[in-house]
Each structure stands twice: as C-alpha cells, then as structure tokens.
Amino acid sequence: SDVRIGKLFGTARYSDNRGFVSADILQGDKRVLRAVADSLPLAIRWFSWDTLPGRVRASAVADSADFTLVQAWVDMISNVTGKVSGSLSLDGTWRNPNLVAGARLTDGAMRIDTLGIALSRMFGRVSYRNDTLRIDSVRVQSGGEFADELVQAGEQAEDALVREDAPD
C-alpha cells in the first residue's frame, strides 16, 4: 500500500558481533518517531544471521506519529488516520526479553475492508508489561454509535476468569 510517513533517516553499524540501529521519522520539521537498538548481539554472515548470548536493548518514542503507518503492515484496512504517542523499551536477552510499552491513539479512523465497516473518532490507551497487553481505554464510533463499553466487557471477562481460577 502507498503509505507516506514523512522523511525517514536511519543508521546501522555492526562490529564485534554487535549491531546498532537507529531510525528517525520527521514530518515537516518535527521528529515524530525515534527508535534506537543500541545492543543487538548477532552473528551476521554473508547470507544469514543468528542471535548470540548477551544483552539486548532497544527503545522507541513516538510523539504524534501518523497512525497511517499501521496500514503498511495490515492489508485489510484502509483510510487510516490519527496520531499515536507512546514509548517502548526492550531490555534483557534474546531468550528472556523484557518489553515495556505504552501508547495513546487520538482522533483515529480506519476502514476495515474485509468487514465493510468504517470506524471513526477512535481514542484509546494501551500498555504492555510482563507479557500482558492491557487495554486501558477505548472509544470508537461506527454508524453513529459509540462503543466504549468494550473495556468494561473485557474487565468483566477478566474478573470472571480470575474468580473461576481462584483457590477455594
């Protein structure tokens, strides 16, 4: 798909079985995304690569980045708009990574082509920590109706599972 994200600047280095990669996305004069992987233990050969033991560290910060970027990864959506702000931090090893992230979507919209529906006025917050994705809040409009009960339903389902698994 034809997704325009602004100007992309990047660097990559590899030496002593360590990789370093950085990327910046600028929209106009504003940097909306900064991503850095400053510790990637890798064994890179002519036509292959493999992970090595050692510390893995990467981070990314988005400040009002275009939500349109998701359209490049998900074929079944179109007409994506909105802004995303948030951060991501990865630290640990390839075998035991520790990922912590949080993001906020404002004024989003998209069409889900496979379902034939349009979503608008999308707002939400998500976070990820300890292998758990948490939807902190969601609000979406489709066909004139708002759907913000999704979070409540999810919380009720989670509560029911916790109660069901609780020891007697």
Image (cartoon, rainbow, N blue to C red):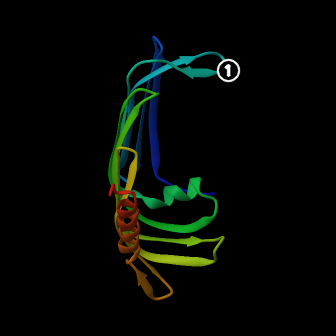
Query: In the figure, residue 131 lies in which quadrant?
Result: top left
Q: Is residue 167 left or right of residue 49?
A: left
Q: Nearer the viewer, residue 120 or 158?
A: 158
Residue density around tag 1, few if under 14, some if 14–19, many if 20 or more, within 10 Å? few
> Is residue 30 something one can see in this rendering?
no
Query: In the figure, residue 160 lies in which quadrant?
Result: bottom left
Extreme residue toward the top, this view: 16
The N terminus, quarter of image: bottom right
Above or below, comparing residue 56 to residue 167 in the picture: above
Above or below, comparing residue 79 to residue 68 in the picture: below
Q: Is residue 64 left or right of residue 5?
A: left
What amino acid type is highlighted by mark number 1?
A: Phe
- Name the residue that disc number 1 marks: 47
Label 1: element kind: loop
Q: Nearer the viewer, residue 30 or 13?
A: 13
The C terminus, quarter of image: bottom left
Residue 75 x %, y %:
64, 59
**Residue drawn at (50%, 76%), measured in percent from left and top?**
119
Q: Nearer the viewer, residue 77 or 64?
A: 77
Residue 62 x %, y %:
35, 50
**Residue drawn at (49%, 18%), measured in percent from left and top?**
52
Q: Is residue 110 left or right of residue 127?
A: right
Above or below, comparing residue 69 to residue 34 in the picture: below
Extreme residue toward the front, this view: 168
**Residue drawn at (47%, 26%), measured in percent from left and top?**
12
